[in-house]
Image (tube, grey):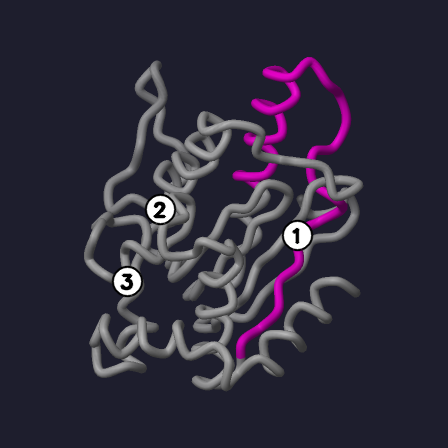
Amino acid sequence: MPGKYLEKMYVEHSYYHIYSRGINKEAVFRDQDDYAVFLNLFKRYLSNKPVKDNKGREYLWLHNDIQLLAFCLMRNHFHALVYQSQPKALTELFKGMMTTYGMYFNKKYGRVGPVFQSRFRANMVTSDQYLQHISRYIHLNPKDYRHWPYSSLPYYTSQKTTDWCQPDKILELFNKSSKQYMNFVRDYEDYKKTLDDLKFELANA
């Protein structure tokens, strides 16, 4: 989550690659329920209608301020690709999600202290080519990426639909064709250097 004394103002109408890992590279998702809780937090903040708690109070609602374009949850880290139209939306979303998830995780597993290592990282995506590569990099994180249940890839192939994950901005770069996008994902050998560079960036973040 963002550091106690560090709050960044990210640029409006911009794309960002967000990532964070568990403290000491420890697991942040230990079972299916953990993954489900984190995904439900995306739903809470990004659904097209505000979500209410059990007392009828609305949670923070960011559907009109930020779009989740792609994501992948791995055992000890997560990635997300977002487009924000309001400069504070990115911080509000991930600060809220990571704080809430951390409280859930610590209560469930009887632990104290931070769950995630430092604050989340947010890199601005400044070109269509980089946007394409980041989306593919995110989806290729799992070895069995085609069947990994905790990524946005099924929303790109219309196997799943939802109002809180919106792949259209990426698919528009592929003539709105899921087939073209999947061919691009499969064709990872031609872009191995690009993917390796991204891995190096994350390893040294």
127, 157: nearer the viewer:
157
Secondary structure of residue under mark 3: helix
Q: Horizontal and vertical percent for residue 186?
A: 39, 73
Q: Horizontal and vertical percent for residue 99?
A: 61, 34
State the residue at coordinates (51%, 80%): 189
130, 147: nearer the viewer:
147
Compared to 36, does 154 lie above or below? below
Residue on which disc 2 sits: 46
Name the image quarter holding the C terminus: bottom right
State the residue at coordinates (62%, 69%): 123
Crowdedness near tag 1: few (<14), some (14–19) or many (≥20) residues, C-alpha within 10 Å: some
**How far apart are labels 2 and 1 at the CA level?**
19 Å
- The reply to whether callout 3 and callout 2 are in contact (CB within 8 Å) is no
Q: Horizontal and vertical percent for residue 4?
A: 77, 42
Residue on which disc 3 sits: 156
Camera-side mark, 3 or 2: 3
In the image, the segment drawn in magenta is: 96-125
Given the image, on which type of amino acid does mark 1 rest? Phe
Identify the image quadrant of residue 51: top left
Given the image, on which type of amino acid does mark 2 rest? Leu
Name the image quarter holding the N terminus: top right
Residue on which disc 1 sits: 120
**How far apart are labels 3 and 1 at the CA level?**
25 Å
Crowdedness near tag 3: few (<14), some (14–19) or many (≥20) residues, C-alpha within 10 Å: many
Q: Horizontal and vertical percent for residue 132?
A: 43, 78
State the residue at coordinates (70%, 64%): 202
Compared to 191, does 93 lie above or below? above
Q: Is residue 167 visible?
A: yes
